[in-house]
Image: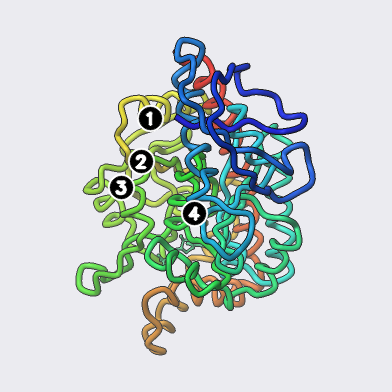
Amino acid sequence: MQVVRSVGHFKAVNCLRVPLVERKTSISIMGSGPLASLEVIHCAKLMESEISTSARTRLATIARHMSPSNCCSTSHHGGIRIEGRVRDALMAGKPVVALESTIISHGMPYPQNFQVAKEVESIVQQSGVTPATIAIIDGIPCIGLMEHELEKLAQLGPQCVKTSRRNIAYVMAKKLTGATTVSGTMFLASKVGIHVFVTGGIGGVHRHGETTMDVSADLTELGRTAVTVVCAGVKSILDIPRTLEYLETQGVTVIGYGTDEFPAFFTPQSGCQAPCRADTPEECATIIGENLKVGLQSGILIGVPIPSQDAAMADAVESAIQSSLMETKAKHITGAEVTPYILMRVNELTGGASLSANIALIRNNALVGSQIAVALADKLAKSP
Ligand SMILES: O=c1[nH]cc([C@@H]2O[C@H](COP(=O)(O)O)[C@@H](O)[C@H]2O)c(=O)[nH]1
């Protein structure tokens, strides 16, 4: 088993004693904090009785991603880069929330996207949680971004490659800059042991999906990756009943947060029942904890309704959605282009009201997701 121990000021996780150092490899970590330099230390054996199960899992996950074959400090050898403060938090079992980057590049215009990205990180931070915005920068998957990288994504906008699971390897190989979707972000978050991920909305089954087979990779990712996605549900541009059916097929636990109804992004109501309900962060954390404990290896979707004061423009937004849906048909816009096009048009048609609602619900999700991450970290720390 491998253990990560720092040089410098880093506190040993759970005060583990590391008995035997076989070989070391120096790697660099972005930033200049106490973790700016670490050693990956390969140990013969840990004192098993001193380590809780959750600490052991954490160490194994992080160590795996810091091993010489999987991690590097430059952009030339592949591997995942974890920002120092994110790594500190993960190592110490403190709460971390993953944030996606397609929402920045394709979901909102510049400069609001940059402002919102920073604001969401700061909401998470103020809740005592470490934010980890995920993207692929010049071919390197990054868990946690520097401010100038957030700005780069925001400025590039749709020029970034919209990166879901299917093109992660391609974007890495071509050393491109990719904004990760829900599926891409979930995959990378799971690789480093982040359990909670906050976003605005997820993709789903598109209308007429039964003939076009246009089903977002977000849904299959939820079926195969044990990360909890906190969102405001699914937009009505999609086929919500079929999206929920598909999530059931994929074995995804779908929860309405404080509601019996699955939310529809701009509106709290979709007319569809949420299969499960949880009313507090602690309840959500218990479900996530059981999901991890029993090893289901599938995700959880928590639908948080948009706050009622921000749903005021719901009717105007709904009718704008309908018109832009007709436009996509007339202009033969299909596949991955559909969602960004509709988001842009709905914003234009509502004179910016949809963007305000979008921003408001993301803020709210960041708050709820952070509370869930705190409750989960607490639970995992106490688990035997
Ligand atoms: O309300 C939204 N839904 C979806 C997206 C983005 O679009 C992706 C889904 O795209 P597609 O339908 O092409 O799978 C999501 O993962 C997310 O990144 C978004 O920004 N806002």
Report the amino acid beneath label 4. Answer: Thr
Report the amino acid beneath label 1. Answer: Leu
Q: Earlier in the sequence, mark 2 or mark 4?
A: 4
Q: Earlier in the sequence, mark 3 or mark 4?
A: 4
Quarter of the image where the N terminus is located: top left
Secondary structure beneath dot 1 equals helix
Contact flag, marks 1 and 4 (Cβ < 8 Å): no
Report the amino acid beneath label 3. Answer: Gly
The 10 Å Cα crowd at callout 4, few under 14, some 14 to 19, many 20 or more, is: many
The structure residue drawn at horizontal position 45% and vertical position 58%, both measured from the top left corner, is 184
Res 223 label: 3
The 10 Å Cα crowd at callout 2, few under 14, some 14 to 19, many 20 or more, is: many
Whole-number angstrom distance, CA of label 2 to CA of label 4: 19 Å
| Front-lying residue, 286 or 151 | 151
Q: Earlier in the sequence, mark 2 or mark 3?
A: 3
Q: Which residue is mark 1?
A: 292
Res 254 label: 2
Q: Quadrant of residue 165?
A: bottom left
The 10 Å Cα crowd at callout 1, few under 14, some 14 to 19, many 20 or more, is: some
Q: Which residue is mark 4?
A: 185
Image coords of residue 182 (percent x, y): 46, 56
